Amino acid sequence: MSVEEAEVRAADLLSRYGHLQGISLIEPMVHEEFHGKITMTSSFGTEAAALLALVSEVDPNLPVIFLDTRKLFGETHRYREQLVDQLGLTNIQIMRPDETLLAADDPNGMLFATDTAKCCYLRKVEPLQRALKGYDAWLTGRKRFHGGERGQLPVIETAGTRIKINPLAGYNRADIEDIFENRALPHHPLEAEGFLSIGCMPCTDRVDPNSTDVRAGRWAGQDKTECGIHYII
């Protein structure tokens, strides 16, 4: 699909499915519109189980891309294994940084301290670019209530030559908690310790549990608010 074709396709899909969310949106995207050509990304962070649970009910064999940056909390890896087992997910695709690129640009593993943008590129963006090859669409767990650049998030959008679907865009905190409660989903173990949004260990801090900015602990003290994977085209 060219960029122009993707834009036309996204506009058509938005006109037909833009009023839907959750499973009602996931089902036609997976089974009808992009059958065999759609994947999803998951950080297996604090809210990740919500979308994973919905996807597992639609197709437990849908490819789930997990970016192992080599800088994640050990708790995240264990949480991933717990959710995969509980939800019966059968197609987890673990993508890691290119070792040659790391050796050249981050030989001591401390790039995060001097250039977070480049670190995120090496450890997340480049691996995801490889993982997305062959797919026309991907599902994300982004939500408008996270604010910032996500405040006006559409349920269907373009990402260059691909279509990006955001089934939880209109969900709020209570909606996400309902999914956890109704499906008896476990919470990420670090959430109880004050981590409301969890990424790589060096760039993730605790925040006030009552904070309206769920992502305040990501790259705290910097202008940076996104790792860059959602700008992939």
Image (tube, rainbow, N blue to C red):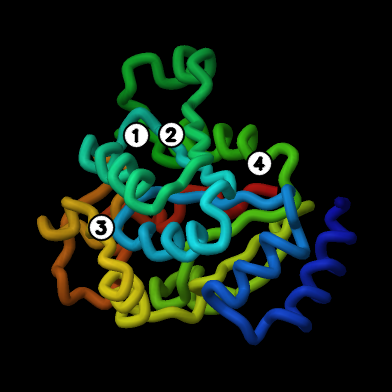
> What residue sits right under mark 4 in the picture?
132
Q: Are marks 2 and 1 in contact (CB under 8 Å)?
A: yes
Residue 137 is situated, as x and y percent measured from the top left of the image, at 70, 55
| Upstream in sequence: badge 1 or badge 3 | 1
- In depth, the one of 55 and 190 nearer the eye is 55
Q: Amino acid at mark 3?
A: Gly
- Tell me if mark 3 has few (under 14), some (14-19) or many (20+) residues whose alpha carbon lies within 10 angstroms of its own: many
Residue 171 is left or right of residue 155, and the answer is: left
CA gap between label 2 and label 1 equals: 6 Å
Q: How many marks?
A: 4
Q: Are marks 4 and 1 in contact (CB under 8 Å)?
A: no
> What residue sits right under mark 2 in the picture?
119
| Upstream in sequence: badge 3 or badge 4 | 4
Q: Nearer the viewer, mark 4 or mark 1?
A: 4
Q: Are marks 3 and 4 in contact (CB under 8 Å)?
A: no
- Tell me if mark 2 has few (under 14), some (14-19) or many (20+) residues whose alpha carbon lies within 10 angstroms of its own: many
Q: Nearer the viewer, mark 3 or mark 4?
A: 4
Which numbered circle lies on residue 217?
3
User: Tag 2's secondary structure?
Assistant: helix
CA gap between label 1 and label 3 equals: 15 Å
